[in-house]
Image (cartoon, rainbow, N blue to C red):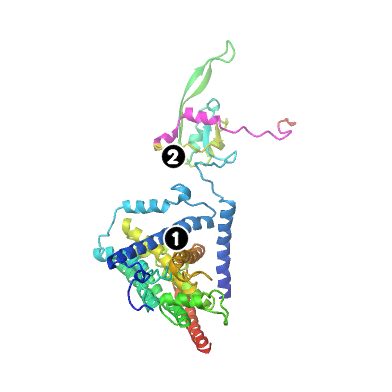
């Protein structure tokens, strides 16, 4: 097990200098976040939502509207970058950048193959869950600095919600960590690949089956963390204009938008690694170049399935009330997650 | 709780079904400029004017809720019908404009016209880049008359005069 930031590509035998590795990693991170966000926007926001409403969605920009997302991005970049008069300018301008940083950091430990990982940290999943809560800070910064009551209300709702749902999310991961015996995401994936059913090897068991309660809790709290629709009170366009992003326009709004969809994809990758066997296929190759190439495709596919689920729920459900949201987190999900941890721990000791 | 979960899955089923239906059978929408929906025969697309029937009675202009009909006319004599008769007094129509930027397509003018000079035509493609162009004069309104569908056949026996 590697215990440092040592680039795994170097271990795989590429032998590149550290600056080249850094460049490759920056490119990979940018590519994954942007491609993931654009895929989510096109497949789910433009097409999936339209199909659910029995219409075709964008059809004119490129074949079947494939270039529509780029057209929207260009449109936003053309717009004026407004900062309100009473705003705290520095904080206001920093908030979306901090937010997109968290979208990138979710990908920090996601394994895309046995050797493809930005950083192989021992406490990987812990670090990622800790880093992803920075987004609360970004949202609070945006809401407070906008000098707008709608923004502030949205940000305070977001803070209450994100903190409430951080707990069930972390607690649901604890079950996985106990079962895998490691916080290292790569080891969690390998534990799923090597898991046997009562002494029979059936190509590994993804943790979504033994940890089904944790899986469901993680999905629900990820939905809330991403403030997607049943939990979109921070945005709540019918009550709060656009919540904490009300005052943003042009490029900065584009960053909020991209970060939102990039984060959905990031959580999709995380769920894929934690609960769905990551880069591995049943009886697929587990090392070497082939495993890495297949691993990228498999991880992206699994992440897309999970983001599809997130958006499906988003496009179907109406918004919760604030008290219903808090009740669900504190009275249902957290006790359930604690029971899940206890049961997992007992079973781990028994078997 | 069980009820909530049931509602949740019912909702997912509804959107999921619609998704599959759209993918397999196509959407209910049409891609407008490329394919057009046939409007209903009597749909309210544009108002057409049959100039010969108009007597400049101004009923349409007065009943129009948003005053989008502009009528001007003058009274003059026209030659007698029979030779040796008196010249007829006649209302000549000089101007008949409908401002479709103001019109709200209520159809009161069509209903109120005592001489069937106004008709609904199902044509709907007359948008303009300049809003002033939406003021259709009597020539333009007369052209729309060619697109007015023929009236339906009367029911059998409807035209036989009854005993007084």
Left or right: A202 in relation to A139: right
Front residue (pair A200, B89): A200
Q: Position of residue A288 (x, y in %)?
A: 44, 68
Kindly identify the residue that appears in the image at 58 percent across and 70 percent down.
B6
Identify the secondary structure beneath mark 1: helix
Residues drawn in magenta:
B132-158
Kindly identify the residue that appears in the image at 46 percent across and 63 percent down.
A297
Kindly identify the residue that appears in the image at 52 percent across and 78 percent down.
A195
Tell which subunit mark 2 falls on.
B
Could one spot residue B122 in this view of the protein? Answer: yes
Q: Residue furthest right?
A: B163
Label ID, residue B101: 2
Image: B146 above or below A194: above
Q: Position of residue B59 (x, y in %)?
A: 51, 34
Identify the secondary structure beneath mark 2: loop
**Residue B136 among those drawn in magenta:** yes
Front residue (pair B141, A320): A320
Q: Position of residue B153 (x, y in %)?
A: 68, 33
Front residue (pair A16, A306): A16
Rate crowding at label 1 as few (under 14), some (14 to 19) or many (20 or more) other CA atoms within 10 Å: many
Q: Residue furthest bottom?
A: A350
Left or right: A196 in relation to A107: right
Give the mark toward the camera: 2 or 1.
Answer: 1
Q: Position of residue B138 (x, y in %)?
A: 48, 28
Query: What residue would you read off at disc 1?
Result: A40
């Amino acid at each position: 097990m590697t215990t440092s930031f040592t680039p795994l590509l170097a271990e795989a035998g590429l032998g590149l200098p550290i600056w080249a590795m850094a460049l490759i990693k920056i490119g990979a991170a940018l590519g994954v976040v942007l491609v993931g966000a654009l895929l989510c926007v096109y497949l789910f926001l433009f097409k999936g939502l339209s199909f659910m409403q029995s219409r075709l969605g964008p059809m004119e920009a490129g074949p079947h509207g494939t270039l529509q997302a780029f057209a929207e991005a260009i449109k936003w970049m053309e717009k004026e970058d407004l900062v309100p008069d009473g705003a705290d300018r520095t904080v206001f301008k920093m908030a979306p950048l901090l937010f997109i940083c968290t979208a990138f950091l979710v990908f920090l430990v996601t394994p895309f193959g046995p050797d493809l990982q930005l950083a192989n940290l021992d406490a990987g999943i812990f670090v990622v869950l800790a880093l992803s809560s920075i987004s609360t800070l970004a949202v609070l910064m945006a809401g407070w600095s906008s000098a707008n009551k709608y923004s502030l209300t949205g940000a305070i709702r977001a803070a209450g919600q994100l903190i409430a749902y951080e707990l069930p999310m972390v607690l649901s991961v604890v079950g996985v960590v106990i079962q895998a015996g490691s916080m290292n995401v790569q080891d969690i994936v390998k534990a799923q690949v090597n898991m046997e059913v009562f002494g029979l090897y059936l190509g590994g068991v993804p943790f979504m089956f033994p940890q089904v309660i944790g899986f469901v809790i993680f999905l629900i709290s990820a939905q809330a963390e991403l403030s997607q629709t049943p939990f979109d009170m921070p945005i709540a366009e019918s009550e709060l204009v656009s919540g904490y992003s009300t005052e943003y326009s042009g490029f900065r709004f584009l960053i909020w938008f991209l970060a939102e969809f990039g984060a959905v994809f990031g959580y999709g990758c995380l769920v894929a690694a934690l609960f769905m066997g990551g880069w591995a296929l049943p009886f697929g190759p587990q090392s070497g170049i082939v495993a890495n190439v297949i691993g990228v495709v498999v991880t992206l596919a699994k992440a897309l399935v999970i983001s599809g689920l997130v958006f499906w729920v988003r496009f179907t459900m109406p918004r919760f009330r604030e008290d219903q949201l808090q009740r669900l987190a504190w009275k249902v999900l957290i006790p359930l997650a604690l029971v899940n941890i206890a049961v997992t721990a007992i079973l781990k000791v028994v078997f | 709780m069980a009820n909530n979960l049931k509602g949740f899955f019912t909702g997912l089923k509804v959107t999921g079904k619609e998704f599959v239906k759209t993918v397999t059978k196509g959407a209910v929408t049409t891609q407008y400029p490329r394919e057009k929906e046939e409007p209903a025969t009597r749909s309210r697309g544009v108002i057409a004017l049959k100039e010969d029937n108009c007597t400049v009675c101004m009923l349409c202009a007065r009943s129009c809720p948003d005053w989008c009909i502009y009528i001007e006319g003058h009274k003059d004599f026209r030659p007698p019908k029979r030779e040796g008769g008196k010249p007829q007094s006649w209302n000549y129509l000089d101007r008949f404009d409908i401002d479709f930027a103001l019109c709200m397509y209520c159809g009161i003018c069509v209903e109120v016209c005592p001489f069937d000079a106004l008709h609904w035509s199902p044509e709907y493609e007359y948008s303009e880049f300049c809003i002033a162009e939406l003021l259709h004069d009597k020539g333009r309104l007369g052209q729309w008359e060619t697109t007015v569908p023929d009236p339906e056949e009367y029911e059998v026996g409807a035209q036989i005069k009854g005993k007084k």
